Image (cartoon, coloured by chain):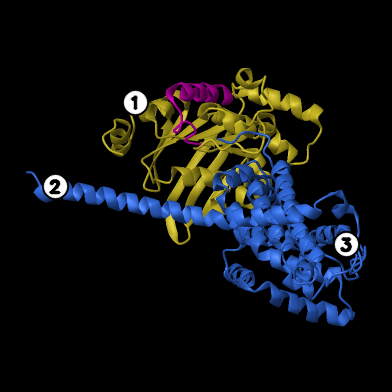
Amino acid sequence: MENKLMDSKYFFYRKKITSSIMMSLTFIAALAAIIPLIFIFYYTISKGVTYFNFNFFVAMPKPVGESGGGMANAIMGTLILIGLGGAIGIPIGILSGTYLAEFGNNKFGFLVRFMTDVLSGVPSIVVGVVAYTMIVIPMKHFSALAGGIALGILVIPTITRTTEEMIRLVPSSLREAGLALGLPKWKTTIAIVLRTAWKGIATGVLLGLSRAAGETAPLLFTALGNRFWSTNIGQPMASLTVYIYDYAKSPFEDWNQQAWTAALVLILLISILSLLFRIITRSKYKTN
Amino acid sequence: MDIKLSIKNLDAYYGKTKVLHNISLDIPKNKAVAIIGPSGCGKSTFIRCLNRMHEVVGGSITGSIMMDNEELSKKDPVLLRKRVGMVFQKPNPFPTMSIFNNVAAGLRLNGIRNKKIIAPIVEKCLKQAALWDEVKDNLDDSGANLSGGQQQRLCIARTLAVDPEVILMDEPASALDPISTTKIEDLIFELKKDYTIVIVTHNMQQAARVSDYTAFFYIGELVEFDVTSKIFMSPAKKQTEDYVRGRFG
């Protein structure tokens, strides 16, 4: 039997038109998603390039009114702060994620999972205020340590949850193979499960650290900033983000320009970090 | 005839569900015992009781399993599993390790690091598993890139490297093509000279070819256990005969 309605040209064209409209919409949305990034790159590169030279990486900021200078202290500071945040957040995140995936099917595991979800939703400025209250006030001065702790707290939920997800993806047949070889559970977890999930975990660590590198708000209350070279984590420390914040809102044209350069350097830094992680975690073997 | 494993009145549970009912049988030393029966009859559960992997997935047992006159439940499960190795249905080589390291894994992770000791063992085990000639030139390649049949033989080599006394095989050839299956079967034939083998299989011809004894399980019960030729030629029970003749299951 022929169905006249379905076979009519009207129906055929309507379907074609609807299909092409929907396809265009998804394409436009996909385009819209990458436009902000294009703008970000365009502005940071075009405006940041003025001061982007060797000097920017090795020289110290000049006093107000003098032009030129660099941000060696801020670049070092950001690296130290990420390092501190990582030193605190990575072990706690990976171990707690391992616990959740391998041993956490109980009430405590559920609680931890819920709390890390809440923690990942806590605004970074709030974490900064808490670090300020708990560390800066008792120590009676701002310090890089307080900043590192604030960043460490911020990266924990990302690393914990990625670690858990990645470990859960490891087929249970590999765990069984390890146990059947006469390996204790802890050895199976470390040498087989974690090793298999390692690449995914590293991606989580990278995501967390990249986010931490871009944080400004929690650092304003903790590491504060420093016009001078300092690698003492007990003292206030400069960071690229705080410099961007200070310089971008300053009235000096010269400083505004340097803020762009600092932004460019920060993006580069995160890209290099990302590249390093890719190289480190690159598998020796092609995976099928 | 020496008895390697003696099972008496074994009941196995998953939570409160009883999946094995009152199993008693003796597994002789350096023989291959086939466990046959329709899906869901408890074959896999049974062999997983023999290396205490059943309890890893939350199962429990009552009754007695003796290995060389020692009660299994009184032994440390980790030490026990070095003596009772297992090959799984789906080949499961460690994907992050090379072929060499897959075989060496059991030794390395148990604390033997000296390559002078490990290398000859790896070679011997790969030869025993009839894989050496195929992989000897690329021992550093990933084990995950081998074919399914090669992966399974790699898993057998990995199990052999720990030097077990008993090898449990849970449908080791069911995911493999006929040529690989033949290789695995030839291998079992060789291995039973030195090891006690318990093999679960769905393939009746396989059971007939490789095993000396056959146990027929049905819905969690041991229906019949006897010399393989007897089970296939003149079984004592009607149920066994119907199953091996392909009338049900």
Who is closer to the viewer here, B158 or B187?
B158
Helix, strand or loop under label 3: loop
- Which x, y percent locates residue A16? 27, 47
Chain drawn blue in the picture: A
Q: Which chain carries label 1?
A: B
Residue type pointed to by label 3: Ser
Q: In which quarter of the image is residue A263?
A: bottom right
Which chain letter goes with mark 2?
Answer: A
Most foreground residue, A276 or A177: A276
Three-letter amino acid code at the position of disc 2:
Ser
Q: Earlier in the sequence, mark 3 or mark 2?
A: 2
| Colour-to-chain, yellow | B
Q: Residue at x 33, y 28 (%)?
A: B234
Q: Which residue lies furthest to the left in this view?
A: A1
Identify residue for label 1.
B233
Is the residue at mark 1 from the same chain as the one at mark 2?
Answer: no
**Disc 2 target residue:** A8
Between marks 1 and 2, how big is the CA–CA gap? Answer: 69 Å
> Which residue is drawn at the image coordinates 81% and 60% (left, top)?
A78
Marks 3 and 2, Cα distance to the nearest angstrom?
A: 74 Å
Q: Mark 3 points at which residue?
A: A67
Foreground mark, 1 or 2, reads 2
Side (left or right) of B34 relative to A285: left
Q: Which of these two is toward me, A136 or B139?
A: A136
Residue bounds of the magenta highlight: B170-192
Q: How crowded is mark 2: few (under 14 residues within 10 Å), some or many (20 or more)?
A: few
